Amino acid sequence: MLTIIVITLLLALIINILVKKIHLPTIIGYILTGTAIAYGFDLHDAVSNHDLKEIAEFGVVFLMFTIGLEFSIAHLKRMRNEVFVAGTLQIIITSSIVYLIAYYLLELDPNSSFIIALVLSLSSTAIVLKILNESGEINRRHGQRSLGILIMQDIAVIPILLIIGFMSSKTGNISTVLMEMAFSAIILLSILWIFGKYLLEPFLTQIIKTNSDELFVGSILFLAIGASYIAHYLGFSYSLGAFIAGMLIAETKYKYQAEADLIPFRDLLLGIFFITVGMQIDILFLTSQISLILLLLIGVMTLKFIIIFSIVKFNESKRVSLKTALSLLQIGEFSLAILELARSNDLIAYPYSQVLIATIVLSMIATPIILKHLTQLTDMFIKNEESEPENDINSDEIRDHTIILGFGEFGRNVAKVLKDRGEFYLAIENNLNTFHAIQRMGEPALFGNAIKKEVLKKANIQHAKYVIIAIDNSTKLYHVTQVVQQFIDSSKIIVKVHSVHEKNIIAELGVTNIMVENEIMSEQVSGLIR
């Protein structure tokens, strides 16, 4: 076992170094590592090992916990349309169409058709949220729409697993099962709500008073794993309990420290999860059925793309709808769990499950590549349908103005404050839909990427009074700040960040005017602009 662990770590390091050199995410490296060790040590049977699956699943658990930290209860209320409307519609429409195709066109048996329909309706929480978090796009509109649908899918896993259990049972009454599920949900939410409202913050405060970092880390691990255990004990998924626990901690002042301490555990266990995914690839079967698998892969991804795009397009722009659909067209990790449960209960034949497993894994491998080139793919769809924006700002006439880089909610609120004061501002925006919206409002704006010096020169940045940087992508935020510093003194730069961690990174550049989101209101910026 020690030999396998050492070689797995070595392979993971080597493969991921090579993967990063060609600018691909480490997720692909972990999957390839799993496939390599499965064949190198004949470990395909180990994939069905219950203990290994439990450990690997906690990567997804910690991912959902950290997502919960960024997703307070108030935030969930604001996103009720994304979660409960769009998410529910996506699952129902996708599974219904797939069932009709499987049962009537392919003439599969009802059980197999039903299982396949449920399996293909889900997307990958682990991959999509990990990449959107790393890129900072989780805070953009398509990131929020993707997050809402994924949360609903995770919630849906609970009744799906219960239905499969009921289908495999020869006795029992479905109304009884549903009542038990509702009763368990009330118990789970009551326990976590009472603990979160009355005990959580005092508990964490006492831990902080000990001035012991290891006790704080231990307490966060206890809360994440404990909530997961309670949810699992009551018949729900581990990740749902962790997500709720994260939302409760998000209501306290310790959310940022909790997130920073948990990230190493999350990333390590997510790596194990993706290695187990790679271990499920049967190369011989894949090559023998490659035509069928690729046909199914293309068909499923096309169907999900059309459905998700159509749902999101009801109340979003075409660009946001395209990005959301492209983000969620894969099949998810929970689908593997559903398949395993169905196969163990003889609800689906082995050949069907193997074809589906291969299709799921290939869709997972394709997803990081799609997400990496999300903007370019979106531009391919819409570039011929929208005219190139014209920048009609005469920069020679601009002096003592405020430049706003990023015209999201924060940027718009700051612009309103400046406009009410009668002070001139200029927005720079590289999202085409947002730029056109600013123009329709009659507000001054330039189209372009703020990281390009030519765009900043066009805005006459060297004569600006202040530059406000409100970009959601943390990596781009850092680079843009560096570029802006080449034109204007750091004392005139105001940066909006999402977390204390981002604040510390930007502070290293010598910027002192840094605003942490949710800790300030945009009106406070007016105190800096005199």
Image (cartoon, helix red, strand yellow):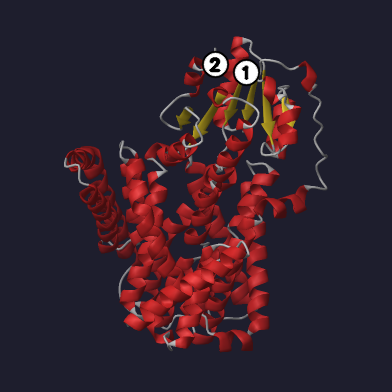
Nearer the observer: mark 2 or 1; the answer is 1
Residue at 76% across, 53% down: 380
Cβ–Cβ under 8 Å for marks 2 and 1: yes
Q: Provide residue 76's location: percent of width, then percent of height.
A: 43, 42
Q: Amino acid at mark 1?
A: Lys
* Relative depth, front residue between 159 and 143: 143
Image side of residue 154 versus residue 200, left or right: right
Q: Provide residue 336's location: percent of width, then percent of height.
A: 46, 72
Q: Find numbered disc 1 in the image and state the secondary structure of the residue it sits on.
A: loop
Residue at 73% across, 22% down: 442
Residue at 47% across, 72% down: 12
Residue 241, quarter of picture? bottom left
Image side of residue 343 versus residue 93, left or right: left
> Circle 1 is placed at which residue position?
465
> Circle 2 is placed at which residue position?
529
Which sits earlier in the primary sequence, circle 2 or circle 1? 1
* Relative depth, front residue between 393 and 242: 393
Visible residue check, residue 394: yes
Q: Amino acid at mark 2?
A: Ile
Graded by Cα atoms within 10 Å as few (under 14), some (14 to 19) or many (20 or more), the crowding at tag 2 reads few
Visible residue check, residue 308: no
- Residue 325: numbered disc: none
Q: Is residue 329 above or below residue 31?
A: above
Image side of residue 176 versus residue 344, left or right: left
Residue at 42% across, 43% down: 71
